[in-house]
């Protein structure tokens, strides 16, 4: 059952071929069998999952079921879940039981999904390898000596190993797309504001966006349709109708202009990855799309701009974790200053501390204009490059990662090298655009990700292009042994 799509499983549930309880137990058994080696989950919610599955079965019998009713999924442990630990991969929140659900969780719960558990992640979503988690690194199912990517590495590894039908993730600088690429699954980062951030623990508020991580574009369309929409509790949520993503999957593609971003195919791209991308481009042409070369001339500034903006916002957001209101508190503090210092020193890991210090420095008096303000100006220049490109093309294309999954520990002592893992994903977050990664031909037996970029709120077009490519190829069906 773990190879069936959401549509196939939903049809089976409706027809009574199997129950949601049976389907849920199937995935719980797979988690028990495989996750000990992968470390993809932080929390398994077995009893709650079976109770939700029973409720889903009752809903199906009553005729009040949607396409997601009874479908077992995984939630990244950055989403608040009522009555369940929400750790954000950090010792700081290891004892935090959320009193409420994030909007994403609520909407999927209303759609009838079953939550199997919470997935491991880089601490506070800061990382590109899922090695910074307080709970230890996640391992890539394709090669357990390699990373799954980050920060949504637990969700990506869980999907690659078929530990759930779908998963949620978040993307601040590529944290859905890069792990999706390294694990051979489909991952979509929606337009900023398309999906509510309420109840999603903040890293960098102007960049964070939630999205689906699934086996296929079709499954992503089903999940996004339930997740998206205006939320008055999120001041950055956009009040705009949700498109019929599933209904748009087979929209005509004849004459669609796809821009090949030349800056993403130069020095730094692995030769095998380049060949994989070219094969994918050749298959796209069979769908009747026209490909042209386009330029994003300022995209090389995206990494330095991001690593000023994101740490600055993280420094501000993480100041709330002080050992006073919730989260980790040091033992026997001598005074308030000691409480702050030791609680934060003990609760945060090395990468989080590094980014807090960078961000605090960038925001400090005398440096704000030189660093943070300048980075925001560069951000607008990068967004302008995208606007100009979309005047002549409908979709942009490039690789999601410069290389396949690297070995665990290979870049742990080189933060800059680790940051460059997101070199092809970060610009989209700075501009607030939608983008997705989908499986391309394997490179030396490891997954590669083809990345598609769309104009604002054109997730439906991206999903249609990805879906129709997946109808004529089998790359998304490849699974680790």
Image (tube, grey):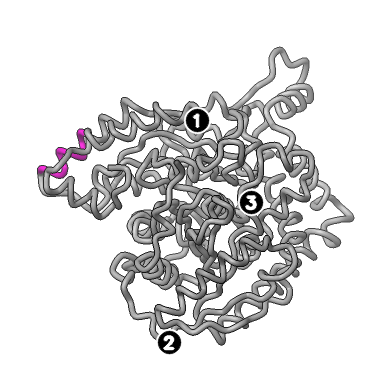
Pointer 2 with pointer 1, Cβ within 8 A: no
| Location of residue 471 (image quadrant) | bottom left
Comparing labels 3 and 2, the label whose residue is closer to the camera: 2
Comparing labels 2 and 1, the label whose residue is closer to the camera: 2
Q: Residue at x 44, y 47 (%)?
A: 168
Numbered marks: total: 3
Task: Identify the mark nearer the N-term, 3 or 2.
Answer: 3
Q: Which residues are magenta?
A: 54-61
Q: Characterize the local packing of mark 3: few (<14), some (14-19) or many (20 or more) Cα atoms within 10 angstroms.
A: many
Percent x, y of residue 5:
30, 52
Task: Identify the mark nearer the N-term, 2 or 1.
Answer: 1
Q: CA distance from mark 2 to mark 1?
A: 46 Å
Q: Residue at x 46, y 79 (%)?
A: 285
- Report the predominant secondary structure element of the magenta stretch: helix
Which numbered marker is on residue 255? 2
Comparing labels 3 and 1, the label whose residue is closer to the camera: 1
Mark 2 lies on a secondary structure that is loop
Residue 319, visible in the rendered structure: yes
Which numbered marker is on residue 204? 3
Q: Outermost residue, top direction? A: 332
Task: Identify the mark nearer the N-term, 3 or 1.
Answer: 1
Percent x, y of residue 330:
69, 19
Pointer 3 with pointer 1, Cβ within 8 A: no
Q: Characterize the local packing of mark 1: few (<14), some (14-19) or many (20 or more) Cα atoms within 10 angstroms.
A: many
- Pointer 1: what residue? 42
């Amino acid at each position: 059952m773990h190879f069936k799509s959401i549509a196939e499983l939903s049809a089976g549930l409706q027809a009574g071929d199997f129950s949601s309880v049976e389907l849920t137990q199937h995935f719980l058994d797979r988690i028990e069998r495989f996750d000990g080696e992968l470390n993809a989950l932080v929390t398994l919610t077995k009893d709650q999952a079976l109770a939700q599955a029973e409720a889903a079965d009752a809903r199906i019998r009553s005729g009040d079921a949607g396409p997601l009713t009874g479908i077992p999924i995984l939630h990244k442990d950055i989403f608040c879940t009522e009555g369940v630990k929400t750790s954000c991969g950090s010792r700081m929140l290891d004892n935090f039981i959320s009193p409420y659900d994030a909007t994403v969780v609520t909407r999927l719960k209303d759609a009838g999904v079953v939550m199997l558990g919470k997935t491991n992640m880089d601490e506070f979503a800061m990382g590109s390898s899922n090695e910074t988690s307080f709970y230890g690194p996640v391992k890539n199912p394709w090669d357990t000596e390699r990373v799954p990517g980050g920060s949504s590495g637990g969700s990506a590894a869980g999907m690659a190993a078929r530990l759930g039908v779908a998963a949620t993730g978040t993307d601040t600088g590529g944290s859905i797309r890069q792990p999706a690429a390294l694990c051979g699954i489909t991952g979509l980062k929606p337009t900023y504001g398309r999906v509510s951030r309420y109840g999603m623990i903040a890293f960098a508020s102007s960049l964070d966006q939630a999205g689906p991580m699934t086996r296929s574009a079709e499954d992503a369309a089903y999940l996004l349709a339930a997740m998206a929409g205006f939320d008055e509790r999120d001041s950055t949520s956009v009040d705009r109708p949700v498109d019929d993503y599933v209904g748009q999957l087979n929209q005509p593609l004849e004459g669609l202009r796809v821009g090949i971003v030349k800056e993403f195919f130069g020095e730094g791209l692995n030769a095998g990855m380049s060949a994989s991308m070219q094969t994918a481009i050749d298959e796209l042409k069979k769908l009747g799309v026209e490909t042209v070369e386009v330029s994003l001339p300022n995209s090389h500034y995206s990494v330095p701009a991001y690593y000023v903006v994101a740490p600055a916002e993280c420094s501000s957001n993480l100041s709330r974790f002080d050992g006073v209101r919730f989260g980790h508190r040091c033992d026997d503090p001598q005074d308030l200053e000691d409480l702050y210092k030791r609680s934060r020193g003990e609760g945060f890991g090395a990468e989080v501390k590094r980014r807090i210090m960078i961000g605090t420095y960038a925001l400090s008096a005398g440096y704000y204009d030189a660093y943070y303000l300048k980075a925001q100006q560069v951000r607008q220049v990068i967004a302008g490059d995208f606007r100009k490109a979309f005047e002549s093309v409908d979709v942009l294309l490039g690789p999601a990662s410069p290389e396949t999954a690297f070995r665990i520990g290979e870049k742990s002592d080189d933060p800059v090298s680790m940051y460059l893992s997101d070199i092809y994903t970060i610009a989209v977050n700075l501009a607030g655009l939608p983008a997705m990664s989908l499986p391309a031909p394997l490179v030396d037996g490891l997954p590669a990700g083809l990345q598609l970029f769309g104009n604002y709120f054109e997730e439906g077009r991206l999903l249609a292009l990805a879906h129709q490519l997946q109808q004529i190829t089998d790359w998304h069906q490849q699974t680790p042994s």
